[in-house]
Image (cartoon, coloured by chain):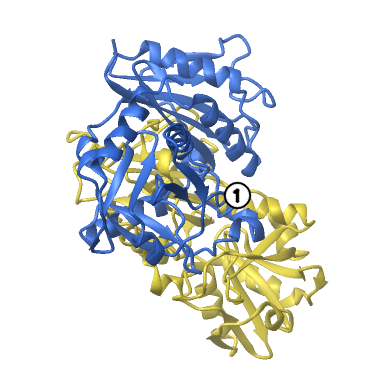
Chain colours: A blue, B yellow
Amino acid sequence: MPLHVLAILNQPSADAAPHDPDAPAFTFADPSQPHLSVMDLGATRGDGIFESISVGSGRAQALEHHLRRFASSAAKLELPAPDLDVWREAILAAIVELEPGAESWVKTVLTRGVEGDGRPTGWVYAAHTADFSAARTEGVRVVTLDRGYRHDVEQTSPWLLAGAKTLSYAVNRAVLREAHRRDADDVIFVSSDGYVLEGPTSSVVFRRGNTLLTPGTGLGILDGTTQANIFRFAETLGLETGFELVTPDELRAADAAWLVSSVRLAAPVRELDGLPLAVDSEFTAALNDYLLALRD
Amino acid sequence: MPLHVLAILNQPSADAAPHDPDAPAFTFADPSQPHLSVMDLGATRGDGIFESISVGSGRAQALEHHLRRFASSAAKLELPAPDLDVWREAILAAIVELEPGAESWVKTVLTRGVEGDGRPTGWVYAAHTADFSAARTEGVRVVTLDRGYRHDVEQTSPWLLAGAKTLSYAVNRAVLREAHRRDADDVIFVSSDGYVLEGPTSSVVFRRGNTLLTPGTGLGILDGTTQANIFRFAETLGLETGFELVTPDELRAADAAWLVSSVRLAAPVRELDGLPLAVDSEFTAALNDYLLALRD
């Protein structure tokens, strides 16, 4: 069985024409071969959206939350609405097609398509996950970096697409290079008015006493699928959960903090801007065991 | 002869290995066929750069300025430096290959390549230009929109890549949709601290008395190739030129203003946020005649 799988959607949105009226909803293709046009607006303008979904023991985790967020990102970019039934079917089929492994992941991508064509491009890509055990147990060294935007930019300036998971991620990659230059592993974005936002590919979760907190929604950041699952788990343990806008100094005063994401899962922040932060190894292990065992 | 031409670079940077050690520097390919991998970071992360170059009577205009800016954008994104000799050769060959037309344009794209591969992807795409005569003569209705960033963000936060011409242009397209919603044609970005910056695909030039002005560099905006040519032309006419940071109100008080870019050339701003702005038809025509006649 293949080590990575590509399914190309024939009609990613019911609001746009299929690429081939006689073809099935999706077809598998060799991911090592080219499948995109140099005129695709995903490639020339980063004009599209994506989701990265974790697969544990052959099951897509938080699938419905990811699909809802995919549709929400599409709406923010005014893309044709993804036909979620077709996407779900393609995701599940790609997982079945993939060589089984302990951990895998699936990426869904919807672009505005070839310029002038009017039909969006959609694909599902599945592969095995890299080994993130060191980040999950030893933790990550994090620096805070200015994201440039105020914390209220999603309300004042929706055209900046803050809070949509777009393909325009050059900045999300540039900040990781800046982190490495500062001898760190990852980044927490801070708004231009001084509030903790999110990581470039993760949500921020922190613990204060018996309460798990996250910055919350409406701040131009993503509605975290892994953060939501962690809050559900915390509630079953009798912990409180909540949303709170904090400064980097307030985050540094937390009892523990994590960068949480679908594929790497919960990575404890062991250093923030060069200062050590306590790592709660036992609770972190419980979080990751819970996330790894999730079946939907 | 073809109506659009694609040249794929075998070795876009001398700092990275060629895709095929036995192949020539570039090869022509059918642009209607797929040539990009779904794992190309240009397509999945908008992680790359581009230039759009005008071609007048078979000659690439401001070619060396575009190539310098291409290299500068690559440096900002820490991409392997483009081998400008190879890019220049591919651009000139693509123009020769294209069906001659009054106006054409060439796009150069350099991406970080397939994730994990280490070799960047590069291509040159040439095609005929759409008819922009209405925008050039009647002008465009423009709205100002918040760009979210302060005017000094290029200095304080270089990881935001402001001033690089990246493939992460989803916002530059979203603001045009917002403009259309407001019954306008185009946009002028304003910094979060209230200064005029640039258009999503153009520079702002304005005239006050006998002086042509533009916001200038270091503001997280592009070093405009067309703006530079217009300033050269203005100086031959005996006009003064200069750089000035202005507010939208100060721009509205100008004697005339234009959005200038490589392909559409000089489009007079005839309305700014719903209020009329004077259009200097004679000078605008002289600008566009000059830009159309440029040979290098």
Question: To which residue does mark 1 refer?
Answer: B129
Q: For the image shown, how many numbered marks are present on the structure?
A: 1
For the residue carrying disc 1, how many other residues have a C-alpha within 10 Å: few (<14), some (14-19), or many (20+)?
some
Q: Is residue A36 left or right of residue B117?
A: right
- Quarter of the rendering containing residue A273: bottom left
**Image coordinates for residue A285, horizontal then vertical, percent:** 27, 35
Residue A290 visible in the snapshot: yes
User: Which x, y percent locates residue A296?
Assistant: 46, 21
Q: Nearer the viewer, residue A88 or B131?
A: A88
In x, y percent, where is residue A99?
29, 13
Q: Position of residue A260 (x, y in %)?
A: 38, 42
Amino acid type of the residue tagged 1 in the rendering: Thr
In this rendering, the answer to whether B244 lies above or below A283 is: below
User: Which residue is depicted at the point 44% across and 59% down?
Assistant: A196
Front-lying residue, A195 or B223: A195
Q: Residue at x 63, y 54 (%)?
A: A159
Q: Residue at x 80, y 56 (%)?
A: B183
Position of A276 with respect to A210 (left or right) is: left
Residue nearer the viewer, A295 or A96 = A295
Report helix, strand or loop for mark 1. Answer: loop
Q: Is any atom of residue B88 visible in this view?
A: no
Up-down relation of residue A210 to residue A272 (above or below): above
Residue in the picture at 59% in, 77% down: B195
Left or right of A152, for residue A209: left
Residue A175 lies in quadrant = bottom left
Dividing the picture into quadrants, the one containing residue A295 is top left
Say which quadrant the C terminus of chain B sits in: bottom left
Query: Disc 1 sits on a residue from what chain?
Result: B
